[in-house]
């Protein structure tokens, strides 16, 4: 089983002292050439600071994000699970994981980066800034990533629980063994509505519960059967989807 997560715009600074990016240490090595191509175009972009800010949607006060991209090859690295911050990753709360939980996360959690493609939770990466819809010189991320990422994920055996946003799911489809998780609110009338902000929070908390349980679920049925024991209501939704049902009182 693997759990596919979206990345976050925000990243934690710092990393292992005297460390730097080693492409060979990243999971899914078949994607190395695609990764290098994106990094090359990103390096080309940041040669012009004002253009880089425009393309990346940054303000002058966020110039530090441009500098992060300039230092990709020399900046210190840390595990992807610790690098990303924000609502989803706050819910996952990697810093408080026990050694057993961290080991399980490294075996099962994958974060889909716009720069690196899918990376394992333990993969050492630097801080960077690139979004799914960023337009690099001569490169469209969606068309660049879609086929190779889809092929890389298709080669992974077992159940794939896809918690990515729809935007990142368009950068590469999960395998035929995947199921897409939607976070929905159910009102008193039984109607369900997809959530936005609390979608990320719920996915983070749900992912942490999966890691804490340490169960490599082999099927959707196994996930659904386990969910109540962890305090979740998980039901089949549309074809190929699961609904994580969050009551209004839980928001």
Image (tube, grey):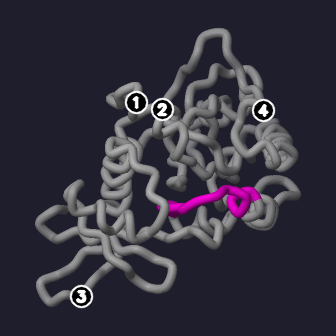
> For mark 3, what is the residue?
191
- The reply to whether dot 4 and dot 3 touch (C-beta < 8 Å) is no
Q: Secondary structure at mark 2?
A: helix
> For mark 4, what is the residue?
23
- The reply to whether dot 4 and dot 1 touch (C-beta < 8 Å) is no
- In the rendered image, the vertical position of residue 104 relative to residue 111, given as above or below: above
- The reply to whether dot 2 and dot 1 touch (C-beta < 8 Å) is yes
Rounded to the nearest angstrom, the CA distance separating label 4 from label 1 is: 26 Å
Q: Quadrant of the C terminus?
A: bottom left
Rounded to the nearest angstrom, the CA distance separating label 1 from label 3 is: 39 Å
Q: Residue 33: horizontal and vertical position, in percent? A: 87, 45
Disc 1 crowd rating (10 Å Cα; few below 14, some 14-19, many 20+) is: few
1 displayed left or right of 173:
left
Asked if residue 159 shows in the view, the reply is yes
Figure label count:
4
Disc 2 crowd rating (10 Å Cα; few below 14, some 14-19, many 20+) is: some
Q: Which mark is residue 103?
A: 2
> For mark 1, what is the residue?
100
Q: Which label sits in the foreground, 4 or 2?
A: 2
Q: Which mark is residue 235?
A: none
Q: Which label sits in the foreground, 2 or 3?
A: 2
The stretch of residues the image draws in magenta is: 152-164
Q: Earlier in the sequence, mark 1 or mark 3?
A: 1
Rounded to the nearest angstrom, the CA distance separating label 4 from label 3 is: 47 Å
């Amino acid at each position: 089983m693997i759990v596919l997560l979206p990345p976050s715009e925000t990243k934690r600074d710092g990393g292992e002292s005297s460390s730097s990016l080693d492409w060979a240490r990243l999971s899914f090595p078949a994607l190395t050439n695609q990764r290098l191509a994106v990094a090359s175009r990103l390096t080309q972009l940041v040669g012009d600071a004002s253009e880089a800010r425009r393309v990346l949607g940054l303000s002058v006060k966020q110039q530090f994000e441009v500098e992060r991209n300039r230092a990709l090859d020399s900046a210190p690295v840390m595990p992807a699970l610790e690098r990303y911050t924000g609502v989803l990753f706050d819910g996952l709360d990697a810093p408080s994981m026990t050694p057993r939980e961290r080991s399980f996360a490294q075996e099962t959690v994958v974060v889909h980066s716009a720069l690196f493609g899918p990376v394992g939770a333990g993969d050492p990466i630097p801080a960077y800034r690139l979004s799914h819809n960023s337009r690099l010189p001569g490169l469209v991320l969606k068309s660049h990533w879609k086929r190779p990422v889809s092929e890389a994920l298709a080669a992974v055996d077992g159940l794939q629980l896809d918690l990515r946003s729809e935007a990142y799911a368009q950068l590469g489809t999960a395998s035929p063994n995947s199921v897409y998780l939607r976070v929905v609110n159910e009102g008193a009338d039984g109607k369900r509505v997809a959530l936005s902000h609390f979608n990320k929070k719920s996915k983070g908390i749900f992912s942490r519960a999966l890691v804490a349980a340490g169960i490599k679920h082999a099927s959707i049925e196994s996930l659904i059967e386990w969910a109540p024991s962890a305090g979740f209501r998980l039901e089949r939704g549309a074809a190929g989807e699961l609904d994580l049902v969050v009551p209004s009182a839980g928001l």
